[in-house]
Amino acid sequence: MQFSIAGFRVSVSPLFWLTSVFLGWGLYDAPGMQWGLAFWVPIAFLAVLLHELGHAFAFRRYGVPSEIQLIALGGVTVPLVQRRLRPGEAFIVSFAGPLIGLLIGGAALALVRYAPLPPSLPLSLALEAIIWTNLGWAIFNLVPIVGLDGGNMMMAVFEKLGGGRGVRIAYVVSIFIAGGIAAYFMSHGAFFNAILVGYFGWQNYLRWRMAAQWIDRVQPIRPQAPAPGASRKRGEAIDVRPIDGDLARAWEALEKGNPLTVRMIAEPL
């Protein structure tokens, strides 16, 4: 399924619908309540779509075109050009998605608590689904695990403070947080949630290992001060440019599988 909205191309995988039904089935498994899925599935679709539109509009704000893909466990907004965002820009792009959910889910929660609504089971189920898929999922997305929006925001802050080393620290923090949450879910019998969070932790462990194997071994070359009395040959140039930024861009391109970009950066260095 493909369509366009607000100038963004959107593709929806069949697995998205299957996962939506699977998640909703656990909420409406009481006898005679399966019809609640008729509310849950379209509301979940709209919640994920609006979340990703938040990311897409933020990307557009910084001149980066993107497209939206709704996949098995949610959605992803994919930039269509290779432009590295500054940490502050990356923070805003990551926060834009959960912000939509917080606003919509918060408004629905306020409506339930403070508005004089008529007693209606369909209305109650619809509002409950809106709160869960917007506010609930937004809060989950803000957990500081890289791969979730909260983790990506954390990584942007750490990168701003510590560059590539800060990024690796974000991976380590994500591993410990994911491990703790997965253990909590396991102890309460929520095995699906434990596997999901554990998967994020495993992915961060792999990223951390890759970063440790490569970034630590490629240190920027710093020019040394000449020894007293030493002279430099005529025409000999000393390049004093810091190359940390170039290395960071090359590493990002390597992770994304763009060997041509890596080569273009590496050859001048």
Image: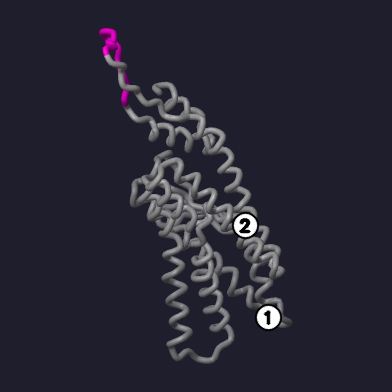
Residue type beneath disc 1:
Met
- Mark nearer the viewer, 2 or 1: 2
Q: From where the camera sits, is residue 18 visible?
A: no
Query: Image quadrant of residue 72?
Result: bottom right
Task: Answer left or right for 158 relative to 227.
Answer: right
Q: Position of residue 70 (x, y in %)?
A: 55, 56
Overall secondary structure of the magenta stretch?
Answer: loop
Residue type beneath disc 2:
Gly
- Boundaries of the magenta span: 229-240
Query: Dot 2: what SS?
Result: helix
Does residue 235 show up magenta in the picture?
yes
Q: From where the camera sits, is residue 266 visible?
A: yes
Query: Image quadrant of residue 228?
Result: top left
The quarter in which the N terminus is drawn is bottom right
Residue at which label 2 appears: 179
Q: Is 235 above or below relative to 250?
A: above
Residue at which label 1 appears: 33
Considering depth in this image, is 36 or 263 the residue closer to the camera?
263
